[in-house]
Image (tube, coloured by chain):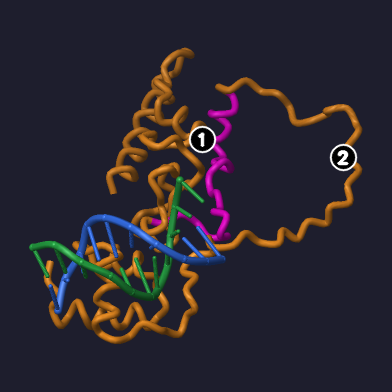
Chain colours: A orange, B green, C blue
Amino acid sequence: MAWTDERVETLKKLWGDGLSASQIAKQLGGVTRNAVIGKVHRLGLSGRAAPSRPARHPEAKPAPRPRAQPAAPAKAQQAKPATPAQSVVRAEAAAPVEAERLASGEYATVLTLKDSMCKWPIGDPADNTFRFCGRKSTPGQAYCDAHAQMAYQPQAKRKRKPADDARAVLDNLQGARKVNF
DNA sequence: CCCTGATTCGC
DNA sequence: GCGAATCAGG
């Protein structure tokens, strides 16, 4: 991929907007962040407006923890157990298990999604609010544990009524559509 | 480990 | 001019 006038122009714009070299590289496509940096230097525009913090990864927050809890001594009167199967069903119905923020406070997008992150799609791909689960997943694994269960669940077992069967098929189709995006 | 930009140097 | 390798750092 060569540095056409158009690409150089885009590079200047994005660099000026404070995007990191790697982000610019991804957006341009066909080049690595090194190529971008090298070009930036050759163009003579090293310094820029933004100090360099595309996503808040660099430093960990001071963690504004009130930290004054005597460490709950009460008996573990935690949430109701509920079997794994029930949890999954519950999640699929109400879908509160979804949206997971990154440490940066933002959501995982196609740009920030890492290989070690859950790639479970959330929302409408055609919408700008579309994002991914983003929770940690073992490299090589597409989803986090929770979503892997959902994706893999044969959804068989349990005598379903014809109506439920159709519903399940529909859900699977919708899920596939999202993943394929 | 994730990321950032900076520099070098063979091509 | 280009960019991979490497370095230094958060």
Q: Which badge, 1 or 2, is on the more N-terminal residue?
A: 2
Q: Is residue A151 left or right of residue A24?
A: right
Query: Label 2's element?
Result: loop
**What is the secondary structure assignment of the residue under circle 1?**
helix
x then y, percent, for residue A139: 40, 37
Query: The residue under label 2 is which amino acid type?
Result: Ala
Quick one: A23 or A92, which is closer to the camera? A23
Q: Quadrant location of the N terminus of chain A?
A: bottom left
Residue stretch in magenta: A86-109
Q: Residues within 10 Å of mark 2 (few under 14, many from 20)?
A: few
A66 w.r.t. A118: above or below: below
> Which amino acid type is marked by label 1?
Glu
- The residue that disc 1 covers is A92
Residue A37 versus residue A107: which sits nearer the camera?
A37
Q: CA distance from mark 1 to mark 2?
A: 33 Å
Q: Which residue is mark 2?
A: A71
On whether residue A95 falls in the magenta region, the answer is: yes
Measuring 45% from the left and 17% from the top, which residue is drawn there? A160
- Residue B6's image quarter? bottom left
Q: Between A90 and A151, which is closer to the camera in this rendering?
A: A151
Question: Any mark on residue A164, and which?
Answer: none
Towards the viewer: A176 or A138:
A138
The image shows residue A134 at horizontal and vertical percentages of 48, 47
Task: Please state the horizontal and vertical placement of residue B9, each as a whole percent of the image.
Answer: 20, 66
Residue A123, placed above or below residue A43: above
Q: Main secondary structure of the magenta part?
A: loop
Measuring 47% from the left and 34% from the top, which residue is drawn there? A147
The residue sitting at 90% across, 32% down in the picture is A74
- Subunit bearing disc 2: A
